[in-house]
């Protein structure tokens, strides 16, 4: 069994700012760092560092070869990372003094993913495999249908949420991992319990993980709900913390089937990540997560 993560790869241009720029305001940043990112890449790195067998599929431009290297060095199988004529996707990220961020995406090569490329990748996977998807690449509706036809279990992190997601057949999703903002946009509900209730009503066969920022996270399946508090940490940069959570949750959940244990290690991994700069660079190794859980008496 392996995990195919068909997702974005971005160059993150991260600007440290005293506060997030307001409309009409010109703000001078304190620094600029260019780092590997993209929800897809970050989640592949998190899966690999958590111990999963992961293959990343996606497209970069000639200017993004470093992103393939980052994946490879983290233990991700990169044979389906292709190079297109379009420039690599990038993100303009403001990070304020409180570690909060604000992101503008330029999709670039991530939106050059077409049906032909998708078919070529999916041919190598079958019913014993899982596919992880986010909403930063093109051809998502097609990939969902084709992966499902091949019997793959579909895991969807519907982020960033936009109109394109309405074209996807979400009834084919096996596991949703979403935050409360995405949950509210998808269901029209505000309260976490109501979001889960509505998700269960619409997608009765799916498992659902709902992350709630500083209020922790929840897991719901067959009407049973689990809750996990966060492990408090000093926040330096929240970029990619959700991606770290996603990679860790999936790895533990697929390995043990224990959703409570998966929520616990995902929470610890993301709390370590928010205390560090960057997205994929902030993802901890599994040994560190286990050590921290032991230190906090949670293992
Ligand atoms: O989730 C964080 C990621 O979102 C960043 O790395 C950025 O590239 C955007 O895709």
Image (cartoon, rainbow, N blue to C red):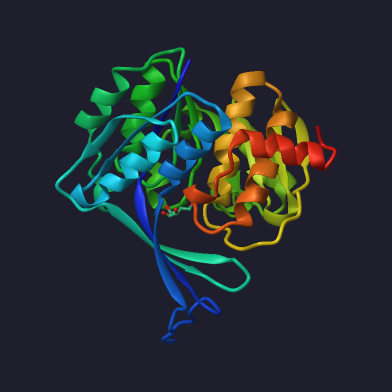
Q: Quadrant of residue 79?
A: top left
Whether residue 3 is situated above or below residue 214 in the rendered picture: above
Closest to the observer, 19 or 163: 19
The reply, left or right, for residue 246 in relation to residue 43 is: right
The residue most toward the right is 297
Give me the residue at 60% from left, 50% from top: 273
Give me the residue at 59% from left, 56% from top: 276
Closest to the observer, 130 or 142: 130
Q: Quadrant of residue 274?
A: bottom right
The reply, left or right, for residue 213 in relation to residue 89 is: right
Q: Position of residue 34 (x, y in %)?
A: 38, 61
Q: Quadrant of residue 213?
A: bottom right
Closest to the observer, 102 or 83: 83
Give me the residue at 76% from left, 54% from top: 232
Q: Position of residue 211 (x, y in %)?
A: 65, 46
The quadrant in which the C terminus is found is top right
The reply, left or right, for residue 150 in relation to residue 297 is: left
Can you see residue 214? Answer: yes
The reply, left or right, for residue 179 in relation to residue 259 is: left
Q: Position of residue 201 (x, y in %)?
A: 64, 34
Closest to the observer, 85 or 139: 85
Can you see residue 198? Answer: no
Whether residue 38 is situated above or below residue 51 in the rendered picture: below
The tally of labels here is: 0
Give me the residue at 23% from left, 36% from top: 82
């Amino acid at each position: 069994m392996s995990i195919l993560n068909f997702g974005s790869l971005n160059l993150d241009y991260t600007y440290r700012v005293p506060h997030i720029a307001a409309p009409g305001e010109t703000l001078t940043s304190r620094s600029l760092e260019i780092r590997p990112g993209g929800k897809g890449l970050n989640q592949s790195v998190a899966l690999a560092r958590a111990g999963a067998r992961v293959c990343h599929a996606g497209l970069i431009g000639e200017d993004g070869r470093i992103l393939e290297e980052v994946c490879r060095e983290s233990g991700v199988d990169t044979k389906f990372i292709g190079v297109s004529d379009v420039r690599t996707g990038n993100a303009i990220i403001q990070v304020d003094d409180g570690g909060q961020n604000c992101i503008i995406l330029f999709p670039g090569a991530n939106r050059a993913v077409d049906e032909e490329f998708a078919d070529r990748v999916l041919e190598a996977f079958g019913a014993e495999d899982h596919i992880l998807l986010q909403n930063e690449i093109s051809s998502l509706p097609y990939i969902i249908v084709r992966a499902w036809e091949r019997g793959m279990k579909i895991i969807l992190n519907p982020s960033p949420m936009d109109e394109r997601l309405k074209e996807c057949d979400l009834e084919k999703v096996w596991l949703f991992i979403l935050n409360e903002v995405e949950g509210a946009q998808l269901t029209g509900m505000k309260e976490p319990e109501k979001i889960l209730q509505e998700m269960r009503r619409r997608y009765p066969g799916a498992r659902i993980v709902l992350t709630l920022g500083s209020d922790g996270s929840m897991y719901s399946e067959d009407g049973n709900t689990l809750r996990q508090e966060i492990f408090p940490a000093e926040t330096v940069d929240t970029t990619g913390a959700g991606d770290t959570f996603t990679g860790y949750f999936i790895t533990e959940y697929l390995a043990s089937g224990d959703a409570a244990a998966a929520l616990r290690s995902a929470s610890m991994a993301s709390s370590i990540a928010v205390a560090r700069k960057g997205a994929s660079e902030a993802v901890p190794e599994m040994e560190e997560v286990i050590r921290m859980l032991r230190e906090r008496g949670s293992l």
